[in-house]
Amino acid sequence: MRNVSQKLIIEILKKSLLPFAAFILLFLIYLLYSLRLDVLLSQELNLFISKAFSTLFILLGAFWFHSVSHGIFAWYAQNIAAKTQTPLDEEFIPLFERLSKTAIWIIALIMVLSNFGININALIAALGVGSLAIALAAQDTIANIIAGFLIMVDRPFRMGDIIKLPSGEKVKVLSIGIRRSKFVLEEESAVVIVPNLELSKSKILNYSRHSI
């Protein structure tokens, strides 16, 4: 466990090297500007330059969070998820990584706009309405993802099990995906793909296990 923690710390430090070097360089440039150029420029220009530096620092912070989060997810995939028997980790790590990166850059964008005095209340409201519209349009997809998560947690069947689908076919479980699961129809040598929501709402007969 100690070695695993050390690997995580090393991964975070590796991902922090480039942002830290960029931060030092940017800070030195800002320090030079404050000591040498500040008094030579007009107040309006100094205000704009200060906001520009603040924007660069915000973007640099977002880049650091982006890099560190990528390192953490990569470390988890190699050291934790690879050693577990459930495919739950491998299925959801890419999704969580994309969501975290999207959230980081959205927060950075809001901070940058606020730094330049732009009213972000309308933007936040628009993002809320847009998110609601997307959620309504993709409600079937979201429902299938949630159902897939529940199937992976409850494990009514596992890969390799022989089960009977709600439609009546007797199949072998090939894979359990985030939105859909795949089964092999051995009699016809065909692959059957079923949405996870349909599986979670129906009765499944599992011939491979007497108790799960």
Image: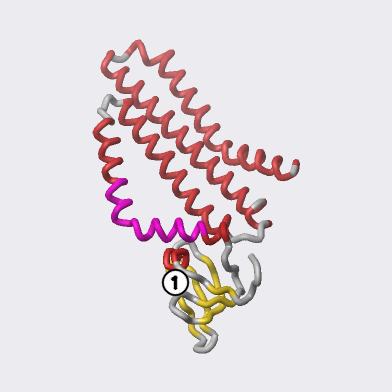
Q: Quadrant of the N terminus?
A: top right
Between 15 and 181, the one lying in front of the other is 181
Q: Amino acid at mark 1?
A: Val
Say left or right for 131 vs 164: left
Res 117 → quadrant:
top left
Q: Which residues are magenta?
A: 131-150
User: In the image shown, does 14 or 193 lie closer to the viewer?
Assistant: 193
**Could you classify mark 1 by the number of other residues whose Cα lies within 10 Å: few (under 14), some (14-19), or many (20 or more)?**
some
**Residue 76 picture location, percent across and down:** 62, 49
Q: What residue is pinned by disc 1?
A: 194
Image position of 109 (left or right of 29): left
179 or 82, which lies in front? 179
Relative height, residue 171 to residue 127 (above, below): below
Q: Residue at x 49, y 49 (%)?
A: 96
Q: Is residue 133 above or below residue 5?
A: below
- Number of numbered discs overlaid on the protein picture: 1
Residue 192 is covered by the magenta coloring: no
